[in-house]
Image (cartoon, rainbow, N blue to C red):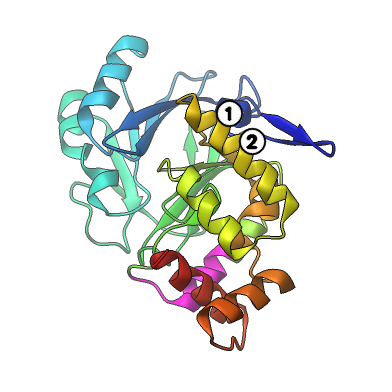
Amino acid sequence: MMQTAGRKFLYGDAALAKIPSPRLEIRRVPCLKDNYGWILRCPETGTIGLVDTPEAGPLLRELKANYDGRVDFILNTHHHWDHTGGNKEIKAATHCRVIGPGRDGQIDGLDKTVEGGDEFKFGDLTVKVYDLPGHTRGHVGYHFPEANAFFCGDTLFVLGCGRMFEGTKGQFWSTLQKIRSLPKETVMFCAHEYSQSNAKFARYVDPANECLKTASDVITDMRSRGEATVPSMLADELLCNPFLRVNDEAVQKRAAELTKTQAHDLSDVFAQVRLLKDSF
């Protein structure tokens, strides 16, 4: 955490500490090369869940060490293997239920399908499902409004966003507008540790952004100490993440200059910035 001109930028454990206690306990579990799985526990009821299962081993070990090996639910955000790879083994070991987006149609063994607008209970907490097409067509996010927590999978990263594998530029920009409309105090839980490389690109496409310079320094310092930079605060992403700032004139001008193309609407600007990141 660093303070510049009166502003503090919160990443990793500092952002995690903003989750209202004791509404929801959240544990970050590193998996694979740069993935995170998330273990959730409702203190009121003892309900335990996972958000995405990149691989079974680390999650099962963490469950055994801290939760008596028990889990009630897996919540999948989308079908990619590095988010569902542990489903089968964890379900076999714990007999948990698997919840995920039915529109993806590519997640085996779902016990319950969800889509945007659905709500369900996780312990005594309400979970609101958001459709987040763009990275994949069926991608969803899970919002815990009473805990100010939003699990966005590969839709939004710290200072970045996911690649546009299946969706359209219009869908992805509409998705990011949904995220922009969340309360600014929302804590954003993405699924990958891409923050340092994202910061380099963000400064390339938004070089005059003083808040971004400070945030980038915070991230560089944290990563030099081996600290996780996920989760992050939506308020900070709104100030620093170029994919949430395509309505800013400076980002628009820079994107047009670098791509040598003319945008006709904000989805075009988003597509310009995404194209630049793809080849950065």
Within-10-Å neighbours for mark 2: few <14, some 14–19, many 20+? some
Q: Nearer the viewer, residue 142 or 136?
A: 136
Query: Image quadrant of residue 168?
Result: bottom left
Residue designated by label 1:
16
Q: Disc 2 versus disc 1: distance between alpha carbons?
A: 15 Å
The location of residue 5, given as percent across then percent down, is 84, 39
Q: Main secondary structure of the magenta part?
A: helix
Q: Decide whether residue 170 is among the magenta residues.
A: yes
Give the residues in magenta: 166-176
The location of residue 2, given as percent across then percent down, is 70, 31
Apparent side of residue 11 relative to residue 49 in the rendered image (left or right): right
Q: Nearer the viewer, residue 124 or 277?
A: 277
Residue 51, numbered label: none
Badge 1 element: helix
Q: Nearer the viewer, residue 1 or 18?
A: 1
Q: Earlier in the sequence, mark 2 or mark 1?
A: 1
| Quadrant the C terminus occupies | bottom left
| Quadrant the N terminus occupies | top right
Q: Nearer the viewer, residue 128 or 212?
A: 212
Badge 2 element: helix
Residue at (76% x, 32% y) in the render: 3
Residue 146, numbered label: 2
Residue at (53% x, 47% y) in the render: 158
Q: Is residue 175 visible?
A: yes
Three-letter residue code for mark 1? Leu
